[in-house]
Amino acid sequence: MKARARNIALTVAYDGTRYHGFQRQTPPVIAVQNVLEQVLAKVCGETVELAAAGRTDTGVHAYGQVVNFFTDGRIPAARLPRAANGLLPSDIVVREAWEAARDFSARHSARGKTYLYRLAQCSVPDPFTRSYAWQLFCPLDLDAMRTALAMLVGTHDYSSFRAAGGAPMSPVRTLDEICLTEEGDGRLVCRLHGNGFLYHMVRNIMSTVVSVGQGRISVERFAEIFAARDRRLASPTAPACGLYLLSVDYDEGILPAVERG
């Protein structure tokens, strides 16, 4: 594929509710990548193989997934979003397309990522947010949650929040921003930015922090769990529906200006 003339990069948004993650699956199981590749093949007039910045799991959403592919197709990059969106289902949207350098890789060129995790404090289940936030049916101690989250900022070993089954890699990562904010009507969003994330890391962090907010574990116990580097001590993985890939960081000049801003 790399022998083809052009390297096209895209930013893509999708509602992951109906899909078995981003990474291509064998039909009849369908992932976001399956759908995107089929549509881009029609637009470009040839087989397309995507590389992605992240392999989001079943039910996880994205505002700013980044992908790239090589093609000999001649459609101008500026016209590609409109052409693709005319064929894509309404829950997948190509937001931006641009000509990338030949050595650009959506995955390997990435320098960092920002994730959001959405929570909803509810008195009864809400059918309109059930696929887009983790619904919780008791008040949360937000001050205690913020105290626990603050411990995670910096460069640390995050083994306590690493799920089995991920790619082999160092558990040491740097998180330089973790912010839990209220959006009104019981809705909360946690924003996490770092240079990389382990398998299920955000969801395991959130489940354990929610346990603090519910009073099931203390802030001091959270610190012990973090320091122990033992996944067995942390809480079960939080639901996928609350997780969103917000954006991916690259060196200056790689993304179009609209994405950098």
Image (cartoon, grey):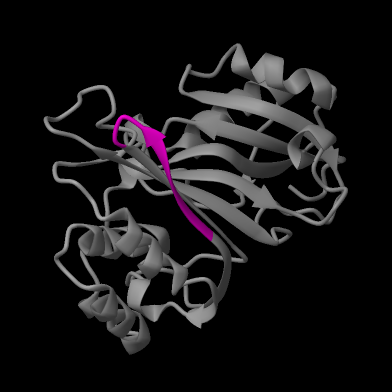
Residue nearer the viewer, 94 or 223: 223
Which of these two is toward me, 188 or 34? Answer: 188
Residue reaching furthest to the front: 143
Left or right: 246 with respect to 253?
left
Query: Residue at (27%, 22%) from the top-left corner?
Result: 128
Residue drawn at x 52%, y 71% is: 153
Q: Image quarter for residue 68?
A: top right
Predominant secondary structure, magenta span? strand
Residue 233 highlighted magenta (yes or no): no
- List x then y, in percent, for residue 6: 85, 39
Q: Is residue 132 visible?
A: yes
Q: Is residue 187 above or below residue 254?
A: above
- Residue 185: in magenta span: yes
Residue 127 percent coordinates (x, y) = 20, 23
Q: Is residue 59 visible?
A: no
Residue 181 lies, with reference to residue 75, above or below; the image says: below
Residue at the image position 34 percent from the left and 59 percent from the top: 143
Question: Is residue 227 positioned above or below 216 on the image?
Answer: below
Q: Quadrant of the C terminus?
A: top right
In the figure, residue 232 lies in which quadrant? Answer: bottom left
Q: How many marks?
A: 0
| Residue most extreme to the bottom | 228
Q: Position of residue 122 (x, y in %)?
A: 19, 34
Q: Is residue 225 left or right of residue 249?
A: left
Q: Position of residue 258 (x, y in %)?
A: 78, 32
- Residue 64 or residue 67, whichever sits in front: 64
Write down the region rendered in magenta.
178-186
**In terms of depth relative to the viewer, which is nearer, 33 or 128?**
128
